Amino acid sequence: MMRYTEHQRLNAVKRFTHLDAGIKKDIDQLVSLIAEICETPVALVTLLDKDTQWFKSAVGTELESTPRSVAFCNNTIRQNELYIVPNALIDADFSGNPLVTGDPNVRFYAGAPLFTTDGFAVGSLCVVDVKPRELTAHQKKSIGILAKQVANLMEFNWSLNTLEEQHKKEQEHSQARKESDLKLKAIFDSSNDTHILVDRNFEVLAFNRSASVFIRSLYNHKLAHGDSILDYTEPALLEQFKKYFSIALTGRSIRREWLLMPGTPLECWKVTAFVPVRDHNGEVIGISLNSTDITHRKRQEDYINIQNEALQRIAMMQSHELRRPVASLLGIMDLMKMENIYFNYFDMMELTVNELDEKIRGIVKDSEDTLKGHRLSIVA
């Protein structure tokens, strides 16, 4: 009895829609053999899809299919063993079948179901005659044995095609991975930043071209897989490096700025990101060390600091050195007013001194604004 749905069975039938030429030839030979053994004019291998009975191999007929609604094999696929109709003309199920009442005037039918390895009956190996008859025990046994061989050949064909498709897909995926890896490597190696992948034991797993060039220039050594990254860490920074590495191993990314090779022609600043690398289970298996050269930025910062210091000195000079004589002149002008000492150009002198005082105050304020966060508190 069937232990599956028709939908499941139809999905199984789709496996055998296309048979390779070599397999088809082998099945044709088995069909010819069973027709000879059973002494019938017609022998068939059928597949039953939703609406059609397809003849995948045939002896004694030019037909390629019939409507499933008239197929004897409908009954066969519901059996576990050989299904026989000795005389269709007097059989309750088939006496009114158009294949019996009209051409080709079927009278005798015997079919064995074709079972897949996972238990689906997809069709049959059957023999047909235009006169009523019976089969001998040998003939019945032969149909059963050859039906299994036909099913095995069909399964073998499907397995080969499936393996070929899988192999093709794997090749396509492999090629896609290679192309993706090449693109990633091109991007990886074209970066000016250094990237080094290190395992939990500080051993180098992967690195890009910039990292290799950097290590060679600083340490005169060719970076290689399996090297300890600690061998390329300055002794003065070693404890800090281990500290940040340990933090990253807990799953937290962290950044650090370093001054490398100070006081040498190779002196440079690097900002390094310690980024945890996880496996598919989310476990941290290593650290990605991604470093960017910030020497130019640091030098710009130093230059700006020098400029700020110069501005501070200028502001102090403006405040004390320039305003001191102006303040003295203003004081003298006030004394002259108190003593009622006036002369022809007194008002013009007073106006000029006050304008000079305002100009100097404006210059001092501009200096303070330029210094931004480092504004001076200048006392007049």
Image (cartoon, helix red, strand yellow):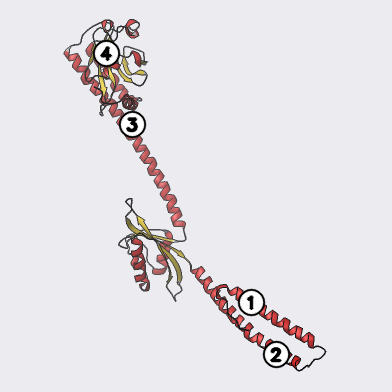
Asked if marks 2 and 1 touch (Cβ < 8 Å), the reply is no
Q: CA distance from mark 4 to mark 1?
A: 111 Å
Q: Amino acid at mark 4?
A: Val
Q: Amino acid at mark 2?
A: Gly
Residue found at x 67% / y 81%:
360
Corner quadrant of residue 278 = bottom left
Instruction: In this rendered view, identify the residue nearer to me: 221 or 357.
Output: 357
Q: Read off the residue under disc 4.
A: 127
Which numbered disc, 3 or 2, marks the residue closer to the eye?
2
Q: Amino acid at mark 3?
A: Asn
Are there few (<14), some (14-19), or many (20+) residues within 10 Å of tag 4? many
Q: Which mark is residue 331?
A: 2
Q: Amino acid at mark 1?
A: Lys
Asked if residue 197 can be seen in this view, the reply is no
Q: Read off the residue under disc 3.
A: 161
- Name the spot of residue 142 as percent of width and height, x first: 20, 17
Q: Read off the residue under disc 1.
A: 365
* Image side of residue 89 versus residue 254, left or right: left
